Image (cartoon, rainbow, N blue to C red):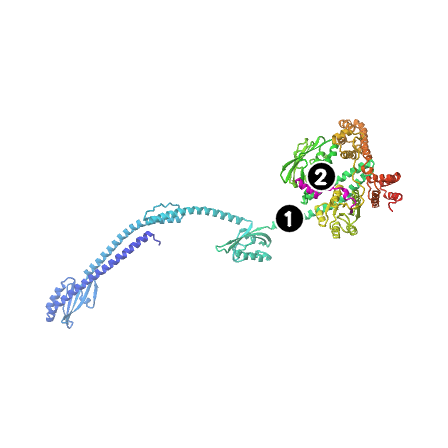
Amino acid sequence: MRLSFRYKFILSFITIEVFFISLIVFFNFSSLNHLSRSLIDEKIQTATTLFTEMVKTPLIVYDLGTLDDQSEIFTSLKNIIAVKVFDKQNRLISSFTSDKTLNMDYFDDKTGDIEWMGRTFRLLTLPIMIDDEPIGKAKILFEITESLETIHYNKQLTYILILIEITISSLIAYIVGFRLTKTLNSLTDAAEQIARDDHIVIPDTQKKGDEISILAHSLHLMQERINERNKNVNELMKNLLYERNFNKTLVDSANSIIAVIDKNGVMTRINPYGEHFTGYSQEMIASEPFFWARFLPEHVRDNVFDIIANAKKGNIVKNFQNGWISSEGIERMFEWSNALVNDAEGNMEYLITIGIDITEQKARQIELEKAKEAAEAATKAKSDFLANVSHEIRTPLNGIIGLTELVLKTDLDTKQRDFLEKSNVSSHALLSVINDILDYSKIEAGKFDLENKPFELTTVLQNIMSLFEFQAVQKGLSLRLTDSVHSKELIGDPLRLTQVLTNLIGNAIKFTESGEIAIHISVDDENDTKCVLRFQVKDTGIGMTQQSQSRLFQEFTQADTSITRQFGGTGLGLAISKRLVTMMNGEIWVRSEYGHGSTFIFTAEFATVDHHTLSTSKEENTPPLQKPLDTIKGSHILLAEDNDINQIVAQEMLETLGMTVDIAINGQEALNAARTKRYDLILMDLQMPIMDGFHAAKAIRALEGYSEIPIIALSAAVMEREKELSAAAGMNAHLGKPIDYDALSNALLRWIKPKQPTETAVEPLDTAPEKLSFQAPFSIEGIDIKELEERIGTDPALMKRLLTLFCKEYETIRTKIDPLRSDMKLLKQLIHSLKGASGTLSMNTIQQYAQEIEKTENSETIESLLPEFIESIENITAAIRRFYDNLPTAEVQRTYTDAEVREFFSLLVQDLKRATIIESDRIALLTHILSEKYDAATAQSVSSYLNAYQYDEALEILDGKLGVLT
């Protein structure tokens, strides 16, 4: 039984008091008892002594009567019950008792205190002595009952007093204890309530010098802190409970294995998902170390054990992947994330591991990797396919374009020229489509790089304007350029800038039937190192709807996609332009309203250079066209080409440029030729039989004296990979097929080392484009020359270019109109085009006919006007042809030396032996020389054979008449 402090205090107080009181009473009572008994003993002794003294004399004299009297007197004394006197021989000589009820014989053999009938007696036997000589004895019976009762009464009274004292002491102790422990009880109750988390308020009762009050104050402060801590603990418990429930919910509901492994390898906990997956309960799994190892495939167990062993050393593998075997025996792939929990000493306490089933993800990853490999293979296949298709298409296309252009330089009738010009236009259109597709493929593959070289913006713009002048004239459009940048010297890629502008201006002309095309260039932003230019191409054409604008810059997309669309194209031009503009750190957008024209705007960033830097750059990289062609004429060129047509085209272009050409039909022949002769430049086709161009270039580079000789790749494969391979093989540059005349001449001027002044080689005759020798005033029938000069200026070259372009386009007008007589809409479109072109070129008669035909709706009237209209066009195109054909050039007019004539014939014979096509300009020059040096008949015969491509017959005449072969 647990007693309170109060009762413990009271009990202790009473116990101590009772003990000491009892001790005092005990000693007092013992002393009183001893004193009382001593008094009894003393009284008995006194009485005994008195009696023995009283009976000595009667006994000596043996006075029995006196003895009896003395005995009677003696027994009459209080507490003396009976006496017996015996003589010396122990004979009873006297006996008397005051209580006749007593049987004295009962007491004879008793000693000490004798209890009888509720009374207490004491029998005392004493000798009667005289001079230490016994004369008898006496037995005296005393009753001590009253004395003992008095002692017992005193004892009881003492007990009562003790009880009263204890009661009073207890009451006093209780009162004192209650008063002393009242506050303690309150504090105790408060402490118990605090222990039970009962909300109470302990009053602050601090008093100076009062320890209990100080204790109460301290408890009050403790309570406040406990309440504050309880508040914090309750909040923490609430949060912990939320976190525990949250974590438990997460762990229990997680679709992944979550487990805890201790340092002995026992998986002490595993979530329900893990139990379900393994088919074992948590208790079973935790029953022994590494029980969970049976879930691991055998080939990964050692690795996992190593992870646990390293974790004990403090090294944790945070992430890894391995399989677990399910209860069905199916291995699933898991990605594991580990976290190490250490004890206070930094040693591993347990490891938490989370495994996420990534089997499907892993399978998808493998599928994606396979798909990626397949996509990469497909991309490579596409790249190879494009390269091969490019080569296969460009190779015959090169022959078609080259031979067509060569044939166009011969004498043709009107119908033949019309057919060939259309064929040439179609070939170039096909080439443009191929170039667009290849450009887009290179941009899409990230293999398209912009050049970074100095150029003058003015030159780029002039070239673009020259390109579109006649097209604008043909449609009767005004082509206007506003350049607020002026002669800006920039660093960038002029070719790709030209490509973007060409696409936008070409589209503007194509989609505009009347009005003007306005090109405006301005500076958008500029600092010391760069500038951002804004280009605007505005037309008055058909415009676009918002829907068309939204998909305008997508690949293979056109504004008009219907089957009846009027305008053709691949739909790649604007997509490529957008990519190019983006690569030039710019943007491109359009503003358009259907029926009211469009404005295409783009920005492009270029680096700027000062005049000193540009001058230095020009000195180090002089544009090829600015170098005199005469400095490299007569250079020896090795052409490695397996295609016969390509050989003819390339050889013709090279010889036109004044080069001496040797041909090798494969890489091995090219290597053999290089071993026997030193060439100034080698044109190397890449794909050839026996030995390709790559191996041939490497082998030639290894020859003595060929480490610095320029080798130029010549191939229809224009993908970036082929360019990289050709550069790796030691080639200096790359020319694509079909071969461009200007690109070829630029390459020759760039890479061939000019002839030194000390070299005395005979220069070949100049067959460069002719220089017009006419000067105004002059006239061409049907053209108002004065008006034309006022419109386009007095530049003879520009005038010739525009007029000859008109001839190429319309000298076969009859063949164009005849098929359209049944389709009045298409016919009027052609007439409208002629009206604009003729008006621009001051062909007033044709323009009047065109206006009349265009405005009339009567088919009979149109039919009546067409014959005169066609005749007027044929007459004016014939007049233009006659004018320029009969116009003498500086080369034909001058007189040649014998050395020049010999060199001319030597080169001519070489070309005839190789069946090289002889252009009309050379035929005209040959006719002039033969007429001047020999006779007109020979000149006419040789000219006729050459124009008919009968080169063997021409050689026979030359051999017979001139002996040039001997």
Q: Nearer the viewer, residue 359 or 857?
A: 857
Element marked by disc 1: helix
Magenta segment range? 609-637
Q: Which residue is mark 2?
A: 570
Residue 246 visible within the image: yes
Q: Secondary structure at mark 2?
A: loop
Question: How many marks on residues?
Answer: 2
Q: Nearer the viewer, mark 2 or mark 1?
A: 2
Please indicate whether residue 150 sits to the left or right of residue 191 in the image. Answer: left
Q: Position of residue 633 (x, y in %)?
A: 78, 44
Determine the CA span between mark 2 and mark 1. 33 Å
Percent across and percent down for residue 346 are: 50, 55
Which residue is disc 1 drawn over? 368
Residue 353 at what x, y percent from top left?
54, 52
Amino acid beneath label 1:
Leu
Instruction: Tell me: residue 839, above or below residue 49.
Output: above
Q: Between residues 610 and 553, which one lies in front from this camera angle?
A: 610
Residue in front for this viewpoint, 241 or 634: 634
Quadrant the N terminus occupies? bottom left
Left or right: where 349 falls relative to 620: left
